[in-house]
Image (cartoon, rainbow, N blue to C red):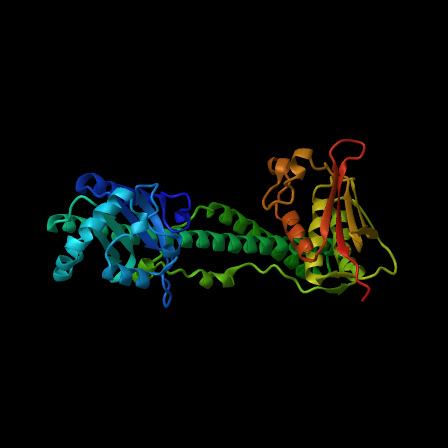
Amino acid sequence: MSDRDPIIICASREFITLCKSQIALLTTALGASMSAVYVAEDLLENTQAKLIEIAVYPENDTIWSEDTRSEVIPQIWGRWRETPRLPRAALPEAQKKILEQESADSTATQRQQGSLRMHRQIVLPLIYEDVVVGLLVTGRSDRQWNQQEYAQIERIATTIASARFLDRRLNWYRERLDREEKLRTISQNRLDDFLHQLRNPITALRTFSKLLLKRLLPEDRNQTVARSMLRESERLQELVQQFDLQGNLNNADSPLILQPAKHSLAQGATTSSSYSSFEPENTLSLEPISLREILDPLLTSAGAIASERDINLTYQIRENLAPVKANAMALREVASNLIDNALKYTPAGGRVDVEAGIELVADNERLCGISIRDTGCGIPPEDRERIFDRHYRGVQAAGDIPGTGLGLAIAKELVEQMHGFIELISSNTSPQKGTTFIIWLPVTDN
């Protein structure tokens, strides 16, 4: 194999090994002094395929020049049919002299026979189901090929052509399995995000229902309505939990039934474009957003939850804040996730502080921050580098606080799509035990 060989991109190791073994058979059993296998780099419909060198013997010989290697099959095959010999520049000096001596004596005989099989150099197309998938080139300088030897070479060419088809089919399955796995991951992530986003409003509904029941007198007719609200919100929470459990049980890959068309395999056609519509969307529409309009309703719900859990929630939204460049729905989700996390990991008697309007200048850009600080257990140093990874919970995974490890991952993805970032400050040692997340977003003057 030559150093410039680009076969890694067009053939598997198994196919390369087979080609080498067939060349070895030509050398040892039939006395070939030179052999090469070329396959089509690309055989898409209405295009001409360039040839790629797969295996060659002797390995230190250049069978084709650089110019010839870039030619396409119709041109190459037409030239070989007219002059079925390897380029003279590729032959060792001793072989050149033998060929030059015999050329004058054999020209007339070759014209009468009109067949490739009596030539010392043979070029056979690798054909599978009427599609040329490459070329087999072989030759020897000491004697001509006989009919039996030619038949053996044809069988070798058939073997290589069939192997090329199987290699294409293997690649076809691998590519599509990879894409199916990618689509499965995208779909699962979207579903996980959706279920996670349901949890906060469901928790708020349960909390409001409980507070409403406490305020209603026993004889109040609205007691039935409030109890129904509580019952249904609890039912929704159970369904989400069951769905999470079922999703975990079904994580094992299910068998995929893929049936490629034979002609597409032989020609090496790909259909990657058919998958492009399944790529996740990574853009959000951004506009000037008021932080107060986003935070006020979230803090109202959070206040009710904090009261039920005996947590002291304080918040400060500075006056006359310039709007930030953001997406309202995305920012609402980010703030909701971080406030919910702060309440979840803060024990009874603890404190959660929310502050909006802190400022930062980075890379000549004004940023406005929303700080959410809790007095919980803090994040250990070994967990901080991966805390924003999907489904990563670190030491909390072994604790008794339920979670999916998605809230922070979703928040980070959304903030980055809004051209901001999240800052993490945490300590798991006293007296400063707790965690602070700061959402930094660009300020807009519009």
Q: Toward the viewer: 129 or 307?
A: 129
Residue 202 position, x and y percent, is 65, 55
* Residue lying farthest to the top in this orientation: 430
- Residue 2 falls in image quadrant: top left
Residue 135: % across, % down: 28, 54
Q: Is residue 269 left or right of residue 213?
A: left
Q: Quadrant of the C terminus?
A: bottom right
Residue 187 is left or right of residue 231, and the answer is: left
Residue 403 found in image quarter:
top right
Residue 121 seen anywhere in this rendered image of the structure? yes
Q: What is the number of callouts on the image? A: 0
- The image shows residue 307 at horizontal and vertical percentages of 77, 48
In the displayed structure, would residue 281 be above or below residue 337? below
Residue ID at (62%, 56%): 198
Q: Quadrant of residue 222?
A: bottom right
Work out whether residue 13 or residue 32 is closer to the camera in this orientation and state it.
Answer: 32
Who is closer to the viewer here, 383 or 275?
A: 275
Residue 256 visible in the picture: no
Q: Quadrant of the N terminus?
A: top left
Classify residue 23 as left or right of residue 6: left
- Residue extending furthest right? 319
Instruction: Identify whether 427 is placed above or below 407.
Output: above
Q: Identify which residue is drawn at 73% across, 33% down.
A: 428
Apparent side of residue 128 relative to residue 143 in the rendered image (left or right): right
What residue appears at the point 67 percent right and 38 percent down from the top-left corner?
A: 384
Give x and y (percent) for residue 290.
79, 62
